[in-house]
Image (cartoon, rainbow, N blue to C red):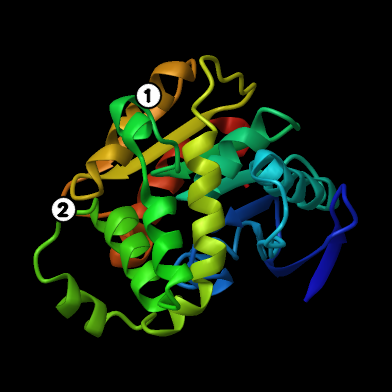
Amino acid sequence: MESVTSADGTRIAYERHGEGPPLILLYGGGGRRFWDPIVPAFTDDYTVVVPDRRVHDADASVEGYIQREVSDAEAVADAVDGDPILFGHSFGGRKAIETAAEVDVAAAVAYEPAYLVGEYREQADLAARMQERLDAGDPRGAMKLHLKEVIHGGDVEHFEAWLDAWEGWPEAAEEAEHAVRMDRALEQHPLADGLAIDAPALLLAGSEGPSHLRDSIRAVHERLDGSRFVEFDGLGHLGPVEDPDRVIEAVRSFLETHPDLKP
């Protein structure tokens, strides 16, 4: 493990795999291991860098939550050799887009980036509902609300059966406090009217992902000049682990269409 110091002095640990131009993978939830199905496909051609996310203090300002995360990604980008390709999922997808607007990158790739738009954002109350469960001493209940909304869009049959079969449960409940802070920050920070990225951008989504995230990614697509949008039929919000081969193929196809991005 290596580490880099972010703007506020926080140490951000990261793994490095392979050799070649830098490709930084930014997860939203699930930790660095989320990217395990993706990493081996790129290590022959790229230096794949997988950083941790910081742990936000419970009393830290919601106002600066997203910018602190972006600063962490900036620090990792500055630590690699050359302008990196950023590939993020969910909250990590938002970090990839907003980091690409701040520093020089070769490209930005985002799978269902965590933006809330329109009427959904105006009515969003996930953080409040989660906090009620946490205040009642029920972190599992709080995390169930988060997973149902973020992964399944809130209305899903057989959720408990899915949860029982998911390898991340019940350990994910240990992240409930972190998740509620993230959800609160997302509810309070809307998508900017303009997004300026001076690099190619690829936006990915699954046809079975939450409807509010499919609305969000289309809104991002409209704001990014020249971005490419790919929707995977039959995949959901966890597309990179549901069918990594299809996601890898789409990313490689995108990179190969830009001569400057070829390894």
In the image, 51: left or right of 235? right
- Determine the residue located farthest toward the front in the rendered image: 136
Residue 10 occupies quadrant: bottom right
- Numbered badge on residue 15: none
For the point 48% across and 50% down, the residue is 183
Q: Is residue 169 left or right of residue 5?
A: left
Above or below 68: residue 131: below
Q: Residues within 10 Å of mark 2 (few under 14, many from 20)?
A: few
Residue 234: give its label: 2
Q: Residue at x 14, y 60 (%)?
A: 156
Q: Position of residue 139 (x, y in %)?
A: 44, 75
On the question of residue 47 being in view, the answer is yes
Mark 1: which amino acid?
Answer: Ala
Does residue 17 lie above or below 101 as drawn?
below
Disc 2 to disc 1, C-alpha distance = 21 Å
Tag 2, which secondary structure? Answer: loop
- Helix, strand or loop at label 1? It is helix
Return the residue nearer the eye: 31 or 173. 173
Q: Position of residue 40 (x, y in %)?
A: 52, 70
Which residue, given by chain and number where applicable, does mark 1 sit on?
219
User: In percent of the image, x 50 and y 42: which residue is there?
Assistant: 186
Kind of residue at disc 2: Gly
